[in-house]
Image (cartoon, helix red, strand yellow):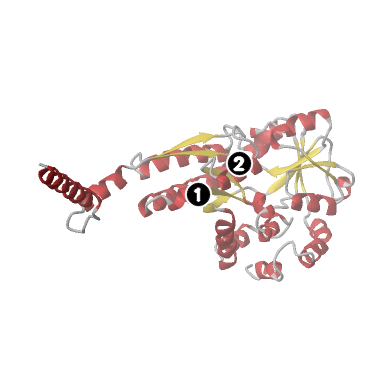
Amino acid sequence: MKKYFWFLLLVSVIALMLVGGLGCQTPTDEGTDESADEEVVDDQTWVLKLGNIDAVGNPAHLANEKLVELVAEKTDGRVTIELYPASQLGGAIDQIESIAMGTQEMGEFAATFYGQYIKDYNIISLAFLFEDQDHQVAFLNSDLNQEIKDKYAEEYGVRIIAENWLRPPNVIATTKSVQSLEDLSGLKMRVPEIEMYLLNWTQLGTNPTVVAWGEVYLALEQGVVEGVDMPFDFIRGMKFYEPAPYVLMTNHLLTNANVIINDEVWQSMPEDIQNALVEAAEEAGDYYTELAKTVVEEDYQWLLEQGVEIYEVDPAPFMEKMAPLALELEEKDYWSAGLYDQIQALK
């Protein structure tokens, strides 16, 4: 009887081992249903939060809405973008850092915000860096710029997928009449949390003050600042013309906005989805660039009709004033040695 018991126990153990071994075996290629795996990938969907600081109705905001539509169309609904405009997710720096951490997936912001992360981006904020928009585009399409973008993605996990959102030149709106370089002396100028803006406006003789973008209107109204530096198409949308009815057409910065995405999110996507996102972001950038040009023409006339005084200026005195700053900052390692001359050679 005992022998029979041990025989049954041995058979049971062997059976369990066989079942366990079969359950743990690695599937072979013949046993793998590749079509099933592909079907799972094809069915995967993404919901991405995209934030910006653009006012609703502003050309950049309209282009963001276009981006949302294009992404849905080009991905057959597999990617849904939830748009949060007008600083709903925080200021630009807060959102950029959230994207780096992965708590926010996407954003659209001026390239000038990235200097505090990659030093070579500081040069983009140097007043009068580019001679004209053709010069600016030559830089954006250059190997120089590609190296900077690659470094940003590698070191901070933020990937730029479109940068052809060409903004109108920066000008200033002021609470009192300013018509020349001399009139800027001592003016309380609002600047963002970007050191280069502070350096530019210090060099030009103003008294720069950092104010959050969402607080600029009130700061102008209360006299905390007397001027604000921004692309021309922001004046009407942000209603800055109400507390600051004087506009000086300095055209001192030719900037662009970038569409960015968390790199881990990007790497998790198949190539067709990545391509669709890039195509959508670039098409939305072209849409923004053309819309911004039209809006500038319309806003210029509209602002005049509201009684806003717009002054055209000779840039020569401003450029002469700024020239020493470029050399000084390069010597202080604000950007890579020789970068300024390399950009100038792209003219």
Q: Is residue 180 left or right of residue 302?
A: right
How far across and how far down the image is residue 152, in percent?
A: 59, 57
Percent x, y of residue 39:
26, 46
* Label 1 residue SS: helix
Q: Which residue is mark 2?
A: 95
The residue beneath circle 1 is: 286
Residue nearest the viewer, comparing 132 with 335: 335
Q: How far from the left and from the top, in percent, is residue 155?
A: 59, 58
Distance from disc 1 to disc 2, alpha carbons, whole Å, reads 24 Å
Dividing the picture into quadrants, the one containing residue 220 is top right
Q: Is residue 332 visible?
A: yes
Percent coordinates x, y for residue 294 in the rendering: 57, 42
Along the polypeptide, which appears first: circle 1 or circle 2?
Answer: 2
Q: Are dots 1 and 2 in contact, CB under 8 Å?
A: no
Badge 1 local density, few (<14 within 10 Å), some, or many (20+)? Answer: some
Q: Nearer the viewer, residue 48 or 83?
A: 48
- In the image, taking residue 323 as reference, residue 163 lies left or right, namely left
- The N terminus is located in which quarter? top left
Can residue 241 be seen here?
Answer: no
The residue type indicated by label 2 comes to Gln
Residue in the picture at 55% in, 59% down: 154
Residue 126 higher or lower than 194, as above or below: below
Q: Is residue 194 left or right of residue 104?
A: right
Disc sitting over residue 157 in the figure: none
User: Could you tell me which residue is drawn at 41 percent across and 43 percent down?
Assistant: 71
Q: Amino acid at mark 1?
A: Asp
- Rate crowding at label 2 as few (under 14), some (14 to 19) or many (20 or more) other CA atoms within 10 Å: many
Rendered image quadrant of residue 12: top left
Q: Nearer the viewer, residue 178 or 231?
A: 231
